[in-house]
Image (tube, coloured by chain):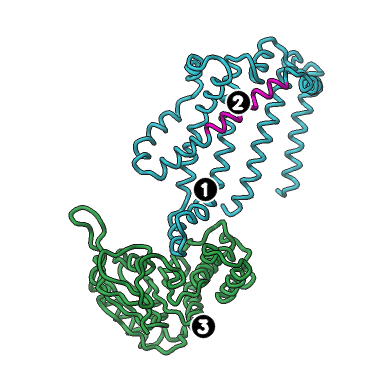
Amino acid sequence: MSQVQIVSARLALFAAVLAAWALLPTYGVVDPRLLPPLGDVLSMLARQLGRPQVHEAIGITALEVIVAFIIAVPIGAALGVLAAENDYFGQIFKPMLFYVFSVPKSIFLPMFILVFGIGFPQKVAYAAFSTVFIVIMSATAAVESVKQDHVLVARSCGATRGQILLRIYVPSMMPVLLETLRISMIFNFTGVMIAEMYASRTGIGHLIANWGENFQMPELFSGVILLAAVAIAFNEAVRLLEGRVSKWRT
Amino acid sequence: MTAIEVDRLSHVYAGAEGGVPALQDISLKVEAGKFVVIVGPSGCGKTSLLMMLAGLRHQSQGTILCDGRPIADPDPSRVGVVFQEASLFPWLTALDNTEFPLALRGGPREERRRRAEQMLNLVGLEGFGARYPHELSGGMKQRVSIARGLVQDPPVLLMDEPFAALDEQTRMTMGHELLRIWSQTRKTVVFITHSLTEAVYLADEVLVMSPRPGRIIDRVPIPLPRPRTYEMMATDTFGQLRERIWQQIRKTE
């Protein structure tokens, strides 16, 4: 199939989903109380985006996501590099990291509430906690993706340690590192949302949970569209960058 | 003039019970401009020896002189190295790969580019500078490796089974190309291979190594005239030289 065909098929699929969303509730095929028509949801989204209460919630959620990201990524990356580069540390901590990685992080949420109370610190701490393990795993994989042959070649060309780091490690690891950023943001965002929906008085997640409990379906769906758009935009932006720096990975 | 002088070199790998002896009492001299090939069974320490000549590994005993001075650390202005397959950096173009040793040193960018381009032309890759390694064939990749090894114009070029991963036909062509490059640049070459045909075809002298711990058990001068041609492979002299080396290696297994 040609690229044009693939793209037009994708657009057709997207249009079909939107059309179904617009038409099925309107003609009563689906209960409009459960799935309000697309038009209603979009006008609700426009109205919500005009409300100061929603602005405030978006601001808080964004701040939580950013702070948790800033905490989890450097710590995870440092531990991951240490586990990959330092044999001793790696052998001791790797099994434990793998065990904890396999446990669903949401079961620890009640503990975070007990320790931090309900609020900003609890949500940030929980999101950072649920993200840090995937960062450790990916950072380890990134270091291990560096070929020792390439390091040897660089040394034979007279490269210093700093030059090996900058000219061999960084470009070798860059594709995996960007992938790590992308995936850790997914975990991070999920962590903040869970924390906000489970027990919180602020943030978009809290609004969405409320709307759901009160059966305000147009509000609920407008929130879903908003968050989906933000998440997809971040993901695609990093993916674009990833594509640029990993052209050579074929 | 002597380009490389190895004097009573031995090497022991650290390990249980005093370690594993890898190389034993190796002495050799390579005159400037000569093409010397080292052959020997797998695991005999050929590659270790080459690593030491390149300053990438340190021997337990003995000395290595290059241009009359010891080799302690890698010095690409004295010794260029061409490795086995896949040693190019896949994130750099052919030109950037060639320029890599120069880029480490800094200096005017224009000049570095020009020098790297010259080297690509020398190895027959004019117009391929913008290609990435995955866009090049196996033979072309090794041409880039040779260009990179020569870019700082070192008097000595070390080659560690550079054509081992290539198919037989490409390998023959590359051997021939290497001789052309060598005759144009007059470098001293130390070349490691498993292929006895390749060894006899390329060398002025073939050094035969024993199994571990590696020693030099024979030095076979190759009196075939230069330039070498493919037809020489069919001659009696070629066959006898190849047979002599083969007997040495077989005896030790």
| Residue that numbered label 3 is attached to | B184
Colour that chain B carries in the picture: green
Q: CA distance from mark 1 to mark 3?
A: 39 Å
Q: Among all residues in the image, which is located at the extreme top?
A: A214
Inspect the image, locate mark 2, and give the three-letter code of the amino acid beneath it: Glu
Q: Which chain is cyan?
A: A
Identify the residue at image location x=62%, y=73%.
B126
| Residue that numbered label 2 is attached to | A64
Q: Among all residues in the image, which is located at the extreme front?
A: B107
Identify the residue at image location x=72%, y=13%.
A216
- Locate residue A14, reporting x and y percent: 74, 33
User: Per the image, is B117 magenta?
Assistant: no
| Residue that numbered label 1 is attached to | A173
User: Per the image, is A61 magenta?
Assistant: yes
Inspect the image, locate mark 3, and give the three-letter code of the amino acid beneath it: Gln
Identify the residue at image location x=32%, y=63%.
B58
Chain letter of the residue carrying label 3: B
- Locate residue B242, reporting x and y percent: 34, 80
Res B163 seen here: no
* A177 and A32: which is toward the camera: A177
